[in-house]
Amino acid sequence: LKAYLTPQAQKPDFKTRFDWLVDLTDAVMLAHKADMVHHEISVESVHVDQRGKVRLINYLPARMKYLFEQQSGESSTCSPFAISPEKLKNGFEDVEGDVFSLGVLAYVLLVGSFPFKGSTKDEILYVRLPEGNSAVSKATEEGKQAPKEIAYQQPFPPRKLNSIISTAASEAVMKMLNPKLEERLELEKAKEVFKEAGEYAAKAEQKAFSFLGRLAILK
């Protein structure tokens, strides 16, 4: 999937993007029913085949890495863009962590940029926490310079960046990105919204092409 997000790449239409999100959401739901949490959903863990079908990959490596980090106490090495707030704070996450990371993936796929931004890795990480990096700042050892204060940064709603994204889909993505795991959107609801949003986008794109076609005739 990463190859489709480069500036030079030909972007898929929005109906295709929502179809991909439906398939990926379905894959994560099936994994969760089998008590499997991915722990590292990102643009690097999505494969697009020659037919244009998507598949979620790296389940086993991501799971093994997560278990190693739990046993060793080492900090997570997963993408700073996609890590869930609870995994960042405590090193632990459950299915809700996958929901958050899938929300990041959905945002990137629809908007073309990551929801959490910063000029440094720490900024990218801590802007997703309601308390920012205040806990880290307070824990700074005496004699050492305290890190720059980083505040929570709510992502910009996708629909405000592109009106072809339905209001329901925009709100669904924002709910998936909620820093409070208990308030995140359920995947079954997300799948339903993405499916409807794909139909909405297809009609909107068809209208746009028809309008451009009429303008070409008038010229």
Image (cartoon, rainbow, N blue to C red):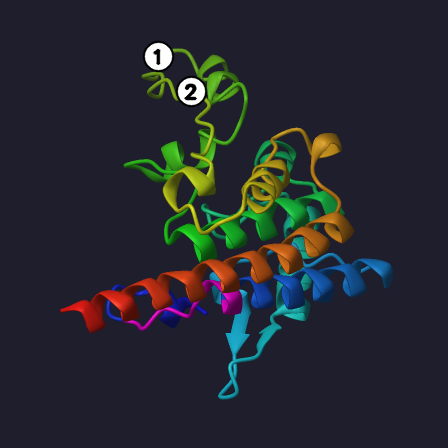
| Prevailing SS of the magenta stretch | loop
**Which numbered dot is residue 134?**
none
Expressed as whole percent of the image width and height from the top left, the position of residue 165 reads 49, 49
Per the rendered image, the range of residues in magenta is 9-16
Secondary structure found at label 1: loop
Q: Is residue 130 above or below residue 33?
A: above
Can you name the residue that lies furthest to the right here?
34
Expressed as whole percent of the image width and height from the top left, the position of residue 196 reads 65, 56
Residue 13 is inside the magenta segment = yes
Expressed as whole percent of the image width and height from the top left, the position of residue 176 reads 63, 41
- Amino acid type indicated by mark 1: Gly
Q: Is residue 44 visible?
A: yes
Q: Is residue 154 left or right of residue 192?
A: left
Q: Name the residue rendered at 53%, 75% in the picture.
A: 47
Give the distance between the C-alpha atoms of the residues marked 2 and 1, in whole angstroms.
23 Å
* N-terminal-most mark, 2 or 1: 1
Residue 180 is inside the magenta segment = no
Q: Nearer the viewer, residue 71 or 65?
A: 65
Where is mark 1, residue-wise? 143
Residue 208, quarter of the rendered image: bottom left
Secondary structure found at label 2: loop
Q: Is residue 203 above or below residue 173?
A: below
Q: Is residue 201 left or right of residue 194?
A: left
Where is mark 2, residue-wise? 151
Expressed as whole percent of the image width and height from the top left, the position of residue 162 reads 39, 47
Q: Name the residue rendered at 21%, 73% in the picture.
A: 217
Q: Is residue 45 above or below residue 106?
A: below
Q: Nearer the viewer, residue 14 or 88?
A: 14
Q: Name the residue rendered at 39%, 22% in the picture.
A: 150
Neighbor class of circle 2 (other Cα within 10 Å; few <14, some 14-19, many 20+) is: some
Point out the frontmost of discs 2 and 1: 2
